[in-house]
Amino acid sequence: MMGPRQALRLFRINWVLLRHGLDEVILATHLFRPLRWIKYLLPWHWVKRDLPPYPARVRLVLEDLGPIFVKFGQILSTRRDLLPDDLAVELAKLQDRVPPFDGAAARALIEKAWGRPIEEVLDQFDPVPLASASIAQVHTARLKDGTEVVVKVLRPGIERTIRQDLSLMYAVAHLAHKYWKDGRRLRPIEVVREYEKTIYDELDLQREAANASQLRRNWLGSEMLYIPEVYWDWTRPNVMVMERIYGTPVGEVERLKAQGVSMKQLGERGVEIFFTQVFRDNFFHADMHPGNIFVEPSGRYISIDFGIVGTLTTEDQRYLAENLLAFFERDYRRVAELHVESGWVPPGTRVDEFEAAIRTVSEPIFEKPLAEISFGHFLVRLFQTARRFDMEIQPQLVLLEKTLLNIEGLGRQLYPELDLWTTAKPYMERWMRDQVGLKGLFDRTKRNLYSVADQAPELPLIAYRMLMAYDRQVRSAKFDQAKVREDQATASGAMLKSIGGATLLICATLVLLLGPGHWLPEQAAAGLIAAAYLAGAWLFVSAARAA
């Protein structure tokens, strides 16, 4: 049930829709369907207005409705699996054109968060914001030790505004789900719920600061990417203090060329940074649009604004790498099998039908030159096809898709000849080799080392208890002498196997702890350790069966 405030807000939304020529959206709703005859009384029904295309009008409506709806449109633009391509592309153009709030109000918010006058922390604070967006704005400042910083502060009352607009979005989403013919397929309630989680995450600046710190650790000392430092002493849930950076916005291509920056190197580095974050670090910056990226004269990227990051499970990483490799080898059967194996489509899905659907959307792509093949658009088509087979799109993959589209578009803006596949394929092949080869085995064994080492001293005791239990069983049973001798021989064999298994496991664990030494190559050591663990486990299993 809508309250008066929501009804008033809904009336304004309808008015904005009407002003931008989207009256068909209003009259198609359940509430106004009986009044569709009114369109014949509207003057522009008979005298056509000069209006932009439908997707552009949707974008203009969201811009008129304010920053929260702009942010919603930005996030909605990432759901290429739900939206027509032309509408998704248009929504991706949405920018936060938000007037700044008063510098004195920003100062008061900062002082309240710090619990002290701003002069006790800062030597200088510029009340005129450097940048202003829908959630927060940024002011330049200088710490007492002379360090130049930026202070990011949330807009006053922004949480209340978000709650009100979200309440209305949920009300509209429930109406759409119930009465709109495409409502169940496009799942508007789920989309609003996803937006709610994202927008509330962005309201916690300490969370953003933690993301920045993690990314900075991952790229410390890198010549490809620089992440500014966070000053935790002065960071609060609604205030963040970060090192001020200087660089050229990545979209200013001519300025970058004038500085002697190699566009080819810049494009390829962007791709390498993305795949390194996804596969090496499993922690990627998921809001890498041009407004958040700068470039130093040396060609090193600088990244800011870390409110949205993504992570993948090991299974997701392998799924993604294997899918892309199989796709470019045109192994559509493998792509279909991977979807079923991952559990992302129902287990009863017919692999042959899914394979045929994937082939239908993929083959036209290969008619283009390799350099024109888009990773991002392949993922979009793959998700759209998979949805027909009841695939549930995972939120982390939506973030990945959005980031890949951003990186790909940016890379080709900088260097139109960029061959994303040639740049990325060797990296993914190397990653796959590391995961499934001897190196992967050795690394996984080392990760589990301490758990194994912790349990290894208990293995002889476990063997002893197992044998004692068997001994009690033998003593209580009334067997003839021959049977007893046979069982004793079996018990002796089981004991020898248990001791041998324990010895192998302990030796292998000690080699892992102390290292293989210079006399044995790492790969050979990995093979011997794996063989020792397998043999030890086999001996234990044999002993248990014999007992």
Image: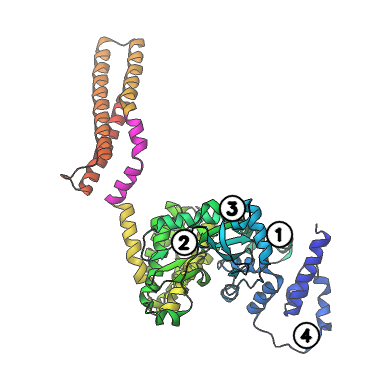
Residue at x 61% of width, y 57% of height:
118
Q: Residues within 10 Å of mark 2 (few under 14, many from 20)?
A: some
> Which amino acid lies under the numbered mark 2 shown in the image of this protein?
Pro
Q: Position of residue 386 (x, y in %)?
A: 51, 63
Q: Position of residue 436 (x, y in %)?
A: 32, 52
Q: Earlier in the sequence, mark 3 or mark 1?
A: 1
Q: Position of residue 497 (x, y in %)?
A: 25, 27
| Start-end of magenta stretch | 438-456
Quick check: marks 4 and 3 in contact, CB under 8 Å?
A: no
Q: Quadrant of the N terminus?
A: bottom right
Quick check: marks 4 and 1 in contact, CB under 8 Å?
A: no
Alpha-carbon span between mark 1 and mark 2: 28 Å
Alpha-carbon span between mark 4 and mark 3: 54 Å
Alpha-carbon span between mark 4 and mark 1: 41 Å
Quick check: marks 3 and 1 in contact, CB under 8 Å?
A: no
Q: Disc 2 designates what residue?
A: 228
The dominant secondary structure in magenta is: helix
Q: Disc 4 designates what residue?
A: 45
Alpha-carbon span between mark 3 and mark 1: 16 Å
Query: Under tag 1, what secondary structure?
Result: loop
Q: Quadrant of the C terminus?
A: top left
Magenta stretch: includes residue 368: no
Q: Residues within 10 Å of mark 4 (few under 14, many from 20)?
A: few
Residue 311 in view here: no
